Image (spheres, grey):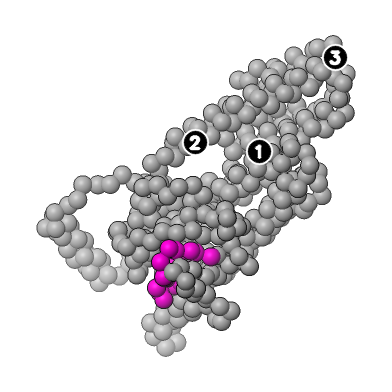
Amino acid sequence: MGKFLSTKGWKSLLANKDCKALKAPDLEKLIVQFEAAEKKADANAADASFSKIKIKFRDLKKANAKNRTLIKWMDQATEEAEALAASLAAEDEGGAEGAGAPAEKPAEKPEEAAAPVEKKQAKDERAEAKPEKPEAKAAEKKDADAPPSKEDAQRAKLSETLANELTLARRRTKDKASKFVLNVDAKAPGLMLTRKDLTPNILKAAVFLTGKKGKTLKGLCYGESGKWVFVLANEPSDTLIRLLKKAALVHAGMKLKLKVIGGGVELDDGEAADPEDAAEDAPAAEAAEAKPEGAADDGATLIRAATKSRKIWIKTKDGVDTLIGRLVAHLKDNEDPELVEIAGAMEAMAEKGLPGVSEGAQAALVAGLMDLEQGGAPDAARDKVLGAVAAYRQGLEANTFVDLCEENPFKVKVPIRPMMGRALDEIEKTLAAN
């Protein structure tokens, strides 16, 4: 527990003769929140609490410029909190290192791998020939309630990371571009982005999303006129735009408008109808055509409902990211160096998603909707989405980062809870009607 930035440290300060008349109940509440985050070793919550504390410190310094005891205590508390933040961030980095992709398994011999696959295919064929029993639905429901497998959890985490990095990349300029790696596969290319160097773990993550190692393309990615720009050293193929779009849609649930540059060639998807629009409606059309004339089209309707829900979510999330970006820009434009520092901390937290909110919930939400769109087991996928909606709501309720954005003293409107709440309501309503 901290010596200065703690309830005990605050009370010791107030006991000093120079600070007995000091009243700052809001600051005391923030210190309690900071202590709670420190106990849980929650770096994001600690950063969010301390960002608000810094604003209070700034106001106290202006109002008590001659109180050397108070100013010294605040400086010591700031140093202590920054050291703690560095320590928690280091722990997070240590835990995340190597988490980019699962450990590789020893390769199986062809004959060893083929036998279980053939057995599974035969089993699947027998299962398809039998009518579905009530027990099967109960088992499906039980599976939906069970915790995700290690592989599913890893895939969900990587999908959330990709979505956050893509959102960030569109905000970055050419001179501060993110780096990307694309593991090329015609069915489901694997894409990963990073603001740092492309490490072997990043490449393994792209391969993991694909399922097998293919040709690897590397380059830079930044935003320009609302589009994502991917830059390579060599001339891009005509299919690269389609592959990048597919990777972002399948693995991050995001629909990109983009252009690709390389070797003196520039490919742009233009303003014409996006090929992915047709691709998104294709599963529904196929499902409808596969049914006999006059039969119910519940499957196709649910697929369309899932697509609509995913678009609602992406549009809302992009809107919230834009508003957070405006607040960060306002803070950076301020002459006060402390506010500029707070802006940097907020930007770093926002790049990972909403701290304390989107940890797993956003990935599960998008993954569930994508399962529905691809014709997955409807009950299991719907339960996954609704469970993620509930988890996201809970994360929004008491969140220091959201408080910091919504209650900022600079009159920059960032209504995160109302915007996200409306989107979650609409998703629930859309799925419930189908």
Query: Which residue type does callout 2 highlight?
Result: Asp
**Can you give x and y, in whole percent of width and height, for residue 393 in the image?**
62, 50
| Front label number (1 vs 3) | 3
Judge whether 80 appears above or below 429 on screen: above
Tag of residue 92: 2
Q: Residues within 10 Å of mark 3 (few under 14, many from 20)?
A: few
The disc, 3 or 2, on the residue closer to the chain's N-terminal end is 3
At mark 3, the secondary structure is loop
Q: Which one is nearer the viewer's eye here, 50 or 373?
A: 50
Q: Is residue 232 magenta?
A: yes
Q: Residues within 10 Å of mark 1 (few under 14, many from 20)?
A: many
- Residue plotted at (62% across, 29% down): 82
Provide the residue span drawn in magenta. 229-245
Q: CA distance from mark 3 to mark 2?
A: 39 Å
Query: Which residue type does callout 3 highlight?
Result: Asp
**Can you give x and y, in whole percent of width and height, for residue 306 in the image?**
52, 68
The residue wearing badge 3 is 18
